[in-house]
Amino acid sequence: MTTTLPTDSSARLPGLIRRLTGDEKHAPSAHSTIDVLQVLYDRVLRITPDTADAPERDRFLLSKGHGPAAYYAVLAAHGFIPDAWLDDLAGPESRLGHHPDRLLVPGVEIGSGSLGHGLGLAVGTALGLRAQGLLQPRVYVLLGDAELDEGSNHEAIAYAGATGLDNLTAVVVDNASASYGWPGGIASRFTVNGWTADTVDGRHHDALYTALTGHRPRQPHLVVARTESKG
């Protein structure tokens, strides 16, 4: 599949985000992800509205689905959904819920929002692509650091490392909201299980791009994107 990446969305995103109101409770969750999402959709992911169902597309899974406002804005910026949808977030006739729904929102790969599910789904997706002989597509999954408090992630981390699932990249947005943390930091939780890892400034687009494309053969890859503290 040949995919031309969309142009830089920087000029459009601020106005699109301002159109989204009604979920102020989760505004910090959404704001912490905007730069990662922008770099992914502007510069990394091989997917467009025309190839949203193509077998050879890259897959992006938003595990951190309880704060989807920035995600919706990025999807609108790249033509997956109409801009006008942003004006009625979670309204009675809206397709845009407080958790994204893959059956209602074009470009969304999974319904998400419950903490701790996205990484396991990403591992299953990556494994399924491998089993089908689809070796070109990559699977990217975006998590919040607090999600790693959920025990289901440990099994996904261990399995992906043990099977050398090298078509998988996990991105953890670290805004210091986790209750427990991990000895040695987030990256060490993954590298001890056979992953490669990069920790970068979650607002620095060039650093994010380098990390997001820095995966190596025979190992899954982690990017820790540090942002300002939620508190």
Image: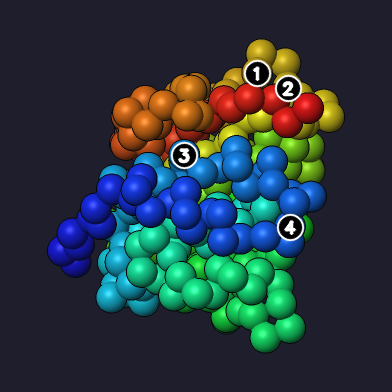
Q: Nearer the viewer, residue 159 or 177?
A: 177
* Image-quadrant location for residue 57: bottom left
Q: In whole angstroms, how far apart are the C-alphas of marks 4 and 1?
A: 30 Å
Residue annotated with mark 4? 23
One can see residue 39 in this view: yes
- In primary-sequence order, the first of circles 4 and 2 is 4
x and y, in percent, of residue 112 in the image: 66, 62
Q: Is residue 226 above or below residue 63?
A: above
Q: Secondary structure at mark 4?
A: loop
**Residue type, numbered disc 4:** Asp
Mark 3 or mark 2, whichever is nearer to me: 3
x and y, in percent, of residue 59 in the image: 42, 60
- Circle 4 packing at 10 Å, graded few (<14), some (14-19), many (20+), is some
Residue annotated with mark 2? 182
**Residue type, numbered disc 3:** Asp
Please say if the residues under marks 4 and 2 sit with CB atoms less than 8 Å apart: no
Q: In whole angstroms, how far apart are the C-alphas of marks 3 and 2?
A: 25 Å
- In primary-sequence order, the first of circles 1 and 3 is 3
**Residue type, numbered disc 1:** Gly
Is 27 situated left or right of 51 in this image?
right
Q: In whole angstroms, how far apart are the C-alphas of marks 2 and 1?
A: 5 Å
Residue annotated with mark 3? 35
Mark 4 or mark 2, whichever is nearer to me: 4
Residue annotated with mark 1? 185
- In primary-sequence order, the first of circles 3 and 2 is 3
